[in-house]
Image: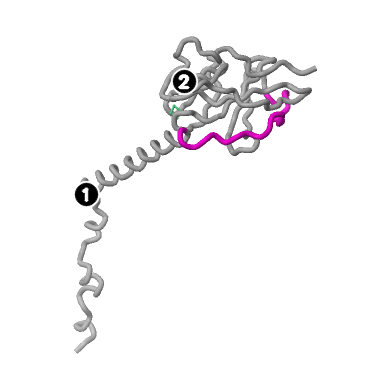
Amino acid sequence: MSDRHTLPSRPAWEADFPQERLETEHVTRREFAKFLVVVSGGMTVGSAVIAVKDDLVPQAAIAAEGTRICAVADVPVGGTKAFVLPGTTHPAIVVRPDADTFRVFEQKCTHLSCAVFYAPDKDHIVCPCHNGGFDARTGQVLYGPPPRPLRQFAVEVRGDDLVLVGEVARPAHSHSANEADDPLDGAPACAPPRA
Ligand code: FES
C-alpha cells in the first residue's frame, strides 16, 4: 500500500470550514446597505455633537488684554495672518482689508467648525464646507447655514505690534446679519495706534 492512498483528498480545515473563497468575499446588497446606514448614522451623530457643543460648552477665555499677536508688518494689506488665540488652542485670523484696518476673528465656522478664510474681493469671510459667508467687518452671518456670527476680537496697533485688547461682545439675539439694525455693524475692530 502506498502513502498516496492514505492522504485525505481535502485538508482538514477545508472539511471543517467548507465555504468557498468566493462566497466569503461576497458582500451582499443587504450588508452593504447596513454598512451605509451605520456610517451615515455615525456621521449624523458626529455632526449633531459638533453643532450643539458650542452651545453647551462655554467659550475658552483668551489670555489677558495686551497680548501681542504679531508684528503689523506680518499682515499683508488685503490679506490675512493666521495665529492661535493666546491661552487657547483656537485658530484665529487677522484680516487687513487696507493699510490701517485690522480685524480678528476665530477661524472656526459656527456651523460645523470648518476653517473659514478671507475673500478680499467680496470682503467676506467664507466657509467652504457648506458655502457659509460672514461679514468681514463684523463677523455677522451673511448667507448659508452658520447659526451665529464669528467670534471677534478687538486689537490695537502699539508701536510695530498688533495687540489683542479683548473679545467683541455679541448681543444675545445676534444670530444673523440679515437682521436689520445690527448694533455692531460697522463698529471698528481696531483702535487707532497709541501715540
Ligand atoms: S461648517 Fe461652515 S457652513 Fe457648514
Q: Amino acid at mark 1?
A: Thr
Q: Nearer the viewer, residue 72 or 11?
A: 72
Residue on which disc 2 sits: 173
Q: Is residue 73 left or right of residue 47?
A: right
Disc 2 crowd, CA 10 A, few/some/many (<14, 14-19, 20+): few
Q: Which mark is residue 104?
A: none
Residue at image location 32% in from the left, 40% down from the top: 40
Mark 2 or 1, closer to the camera: 2
Residue at image location 36% in from the left, 40% down from the top: 45
Residue 58: percent from the left, percent from the top?
52, 35
Disc 2 from disc 1: Cα separation:
51 Å
Dividing the picture into quarters, in which one does residue 130 lie? top left
Dividing the picture into quarters, in which one does residue 151 lie? top right
Which of the marked residues, 2 or 1, is nearer the chain's N terminus?
Answer: 1
Disc 1 crowd, CA 10 A, few/some/many (<14, 14-19, 20+): few
Q: Are marks 2 and 1 in contact (CB under 8 Å)?
A: no
Which quadrant of the rendered structure holds the N terminus?
bottom left
Question: Which stretch is magenta?
Answer: 55-75
Residue at image location 52% in from the left, 17% down from the top: 135
Residue on which disc 1 sits: 28
Q: Is residue 77 left or right of residue 173?
A: right
Q: Is residue 17 above or below residue 79?
A: below
